[in-house]
Image (tube, helix red, strand yellow):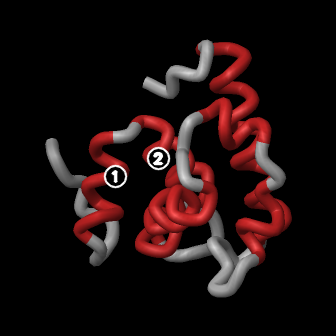
Amino acid sequence: PDRLWFTESDDANALIASDPMALLVGFALDQQVTVQKAFMGPLVLRERVGSLDADVLASADLEPVFREKPAIHRFPGAMAKRVHELAVHVQDRYDGDAA
């Protein structure tokens, strides 16, 4: 599909449908926040970091990015660490290919 209707944002819905890393990040963020907030996270993260590439995320300090207002998640420190670990895993285990 060209969209996954998890949010009210057409851009976010298109991103999680077209980018496997965005979908993985959305699932990682889907804890103790609404589904809509969790799956908006990848779009906000891409806007702030410039990429959702596993190599980029694995080498980035994500905590300040997650804490920038409005915060990407209710628990920015923990989720920044979780997304960083996810990116490192995708990079190391799957050569950066989230698909």
SS at badge 2: helix
Residue in the picture at 57% in, 61% down: 45
Q: Residues within 10 Å of mark 2 (few under 14, many from 20)?
A: many
Mark 1 sits on what residue? 15
Distance from disc 1 to disc 2, alpha carbons, whole Å, reads: 7 Å
Looking at the image, residue 92 sits to the left or right of residue 70; the answer is: right
Residue positioned most to the left: 1
Q: Quadrant of the C terminus?
A: top left
Estimate the x, y position of residue 37 in percent, counting from the top left.
49, 74
Do callouts 1 and 2 mark residues in contact (Cβ within 8 Å)?
A: yes
Residue 89 sits in quarter: top right
Based on the displayed image, in which of its 4 quarters is residue 54 positioned? top right
Q: Position of residue 84 (x, y in %)?
A: 75, 44
At a point 55% along the width and 53% down the height, the residue shown is: 50
Q: Is residue 51 above or below residue 64?
A: above
Front-most of residues 92 and 32: 92
Q: Residue 64: image x %, image y %?
A: 81, 68
Q: Identify which amino acid the numbered label 1 is placed on.
A: Leu
Q: Which mark is residue 80?
A: none
Q: Quadrant of the N terminus?
A: top left
Q: Identify the residue under disc 2.
A: 22
Going by the numbered disc 2, the residue's amino acid type is Ala
* Vertical placement of residue 26 versus 76, above or below: above
Crowding near the residue tagged with mark 1, few <14, some 14–19, many ≥20 C-alpha atoms within 10 Å? many
Q: Nearer the viewer, residue 14 or 50?
A: 50
Work out whether mark 1 precedes mark 2 in sequence or the reverse, and give the earlier one.
1
* Of the pair 49 and 95, the residue shown nearer to us: 49
